[in-house]
Structure formats: C-alpha cells, structure tokens
Image (cartoon, rainbow, N blue to C red):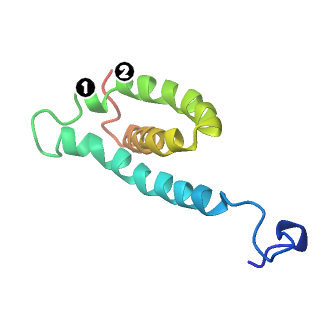
Amino acid sequence: MIPSEDAIDGDGYMKDKNILLRAGLAGAAIVLAAPGAAIPDVINPVGHWSHRRFFHGRTMLDWAASIVLPAAIIGLFLPLFSCIASFFPGYVSHLLAESTTRAGLPA
C-alpha cells in the first residue's frame, strides 16, 4: 500500500513513525492468541482424566470473557498490554468452540 501524500513529510519520510511499531504489535497480538486457544488442552490434555475439568469449565469461560473487554480498552492506551491480553480471546474462543460439542462445558 502506498501512503497518501499527507502521510509523508517534506523530506520524504512518513510522518507517523510508530506505524511499524503498531503493525508489529498487531501481528504479535494475533500470534499470541494461538497459545491462548491451545492452553486449555495443554493444561487438561485430551484423554486425560482431568480433561474438561476446571480449565474447560464455565467458570473459567466467564472469568476469561470478563477480562476481554477491559483488556481491549486498556490496550487502546497501552499497545504492549494488548499483545499480552490477546491471550484471552484465544482462550475464550477455545471454550466457546468446545461448548458446541456434544459434551459441552462442565459447570
């Protein structure tokens, strides 16, 4: 994508010096959501007696979901925080996907 003329200063450099930082943080946030989605099965492996216990339960879903919105708001002001907080949407998406299975989520 070619930047518009008003995005370039008189010397030919981009006015917004933080654009690469923001792009890198956005990429990091996407990459960090993947471990969030995988961690429930790392903590409680499939086939183990502990699978679908506490870390796959509705209590954890409620807890993680309650963190997503405040983390997103804080991330608007502290971009690095949004990378760290991107773990939680991955976790929530895993639990929501598991809630659609026949076994569902334990209480």
Q: Earlier in the sequence, mark 2 or mark 1?
A: 1
x then y, percent, for residue 98: 36, 42
Residue at the left extreme? 49
User: Which residue is located at x 37 percent, y 47 percent?
Assistant: 37
Q: CA distance from mark 2 to mark 1?
A: 8 Å
54 left or right, relative to 86: left
User: Which residue is located at x 42 percent, y 23 percent?
Assistant: 63
x then y, percent, for residue 1: 74, 77
Q: Secondary structure at mark 2?
A: helix
Say whether marks 2 and 1 touch (CB < 8 Å): yes
**Amino acid found under the numbered disc labelled 2:** Thr
**Quadrant in which the C terminus is drawn:** top left
User: Is 96 rendered above or below residue 29?
Assistant: above
x then y, percent, for residue 30: 49, 55
x then y, percent, for residue 78: 58, 37
User: Is 74 rendered above or below residue 94?
Assistant: above
> Badge 2: how crowded within 10 Å, few (<14), some, or many (20+)?
some
**Amino acid found under the numbered disc labelled 1:** Phe
Residue at the front extreme? 11
Between residue 65 and residue 86, name the one nearer to us: 86
Residue named by callout 2: 59
> Badge 1: how crowded within 10 Å, few (<14), some, or many (20+)?
some
Q: Secondary structure at mark 1?
A: helix
User: Which residue is located at x 75 percent, y 73 percent?
Assistant: 13
Residue named by callout 1: 54
Between residue 92 and residue 15, name the one nearer to us: 15
Count of picture labels: 2
User: Is 93 rendered above or below residue 56?
Assistant: below
Between residue 45 and residue 72, name the one nearer to us: 72
Tag of residue 15:
none
